[in-house]
Amino acid sequence: MNSISEIKDSFTKELDAVSDVAALEKIRVAYVGRNGTLTAVLRSLGDLPLDERKKIGPLAQALRKEIEDALIEKIASFAEQSKFSVDLTAPGKKISRGHLHPLTLIEKDFRQIFSSMNFSVIDGPEIESEYYNFDALNVAPNHPARDMWDTFWIKQPEFDGSNTSSRDEAKNTKKHLLLRTHTSPNQARFMREHTPPFQIIVPGRVFRYEATDAGHEINFYQVEGLMVGKDITLANLKFVIEEFFKKFFKGKKVEFRYRPSYFPFTEPSIEVDIKIAGGKWLEVMGAGMVHPHVFEYAGYNPREWQGFAFGMGMDRLAMIKYNIPDIRLFYSGDVRFIKQF
Ligand code: FA5
């Protein structure tokens, strides 16, 4: 009986001195753990004569409950204290945040500016048929203009080498699939399904089988523009392009140069160069008036409808806007690059 009250006294004293969870655990082990002081007493009960056992047993059991309750209470008080121990003067911890990719930022600009000019934003497939990428755009099967775009052809079961081995043979089959070399197939796709007047842009990824350098990638982004209606002229194209660039380069001085060019799907065709704040002239897009054959492919009467189309290189514009010297940085996956935007 003496030993029970001694255990209780020393436990209470030790518990009072405890100030952290680790020390509390030590006490728990020392008293009620497998080899704890009180556990030893409880274990030895069986060796005692019956009348002593009857007296000491309940006391020892009661003390065990008391100790366990006290431990739980103490641990709860620690939790309660830590909830309020906030040091308001401590310096803040920096939480590192994600960044949007510069090309994503540029695409957002495009969507926002063209939407404000009443253009709808349309999407199209990256895996395209040869028909939409070339034929419907007035690029005849064996016309040299097809070589303006070096193409990644998609291997299909019927072209897997067993029944036809040459790429040229495959290229001449209308059914052939490819990775779109430009966003222009979406002109043909959209016109098939819609009746003019309309004005759309189609931002998206395109692919070309060509050597890479600071200004060329094998996959990059374009934005196609198409406006079809009655009495649309080159003057409308010029206005839309100039409005867009003024908004895109926010207040900087933008100069424009229009050069004659050739695309099978526009007539006349032009290329547009811009000069920002007195810098160098840079080619940013191909454009022109929609070729009558393209309207015919779409089922429109070219005497009734006119339209303009353009295709801008989004990466090139991002390079100009953010002063990025090499297009390959966009696709490097280097977080240090992305973090700057
Ligand atoms: C075309 O792709 C035409 N579809 C554009 C067009 C649309 C003309 C509608 C008329 C009417 P081009 O191959 O020039 O044209 O490419 C257009 C723009 O894409 C270029 O001005 C350039 O900014 C960008 N571009 C072309 N090749 C690459 C490349 N390898 N890497 C990055 N940007 C490129």
Image: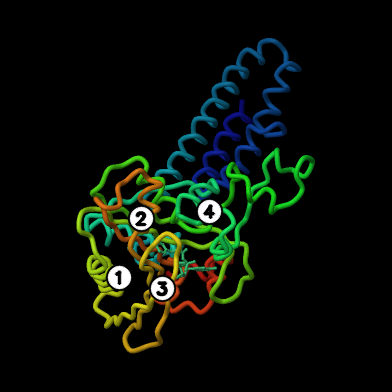
State left or right for residue 195 relative to residue 11: left
Does mark 3's beta carbon lie closer than 8 Å to ligand 1? yes
Name the foreground residue: 91 vs 34.
91
Residue placed under numbered mark 2 in the picture:
292
Location of the C terminus (image quadrant): bottom left
Q: Are marks 2 and 1 in contact (CB under 8 Å)?
A: no
Which one is in front in this view, the residue at disc 3 or the one at disc 2? 2
Amino acid tagged 2: Pro
Does mark 4's beta carbon lie closer than 8 Å to ligand 1? no
Amino acid tagged 3: Val
Residue found 26% across the figure and 56% down from its top = 115
The percent coordinates of residue 310 (x first, y second) are 37, 63
Outermost residue to the right: 162
Residue 180 badge: 4
Amino acid tagged 4: Arg
State left or right for residue 78 relative to residue 258: right
Mark 3 or mark 1: name the one nearer the start of the chain. Answer: 1
The percent coordinates of residue 202 (x first, y second) are 38, 54
Which one is in front in this view, the residue at disc 2 or the one at disc 1? 2
Name the foreground residue: 195 vs 324.
195
Does mark 1's beta carbon lie closer than 8 Å to ligand 1? no
Name the foreground residue: 98 vs 263.
263
Q: Secondary structure at mark 1?
A: helix
Residue found 39% across the figure and 65% down from its top = 92
Outermost residue to the top: 50
Position of residue 165 relative to residue 264, above or below, is above
Amino acid tagged 1: Phe
Q: CA distance from mark 3 to mark 1?
A: 13 Å
Residue 100 shows up from this direction:
no
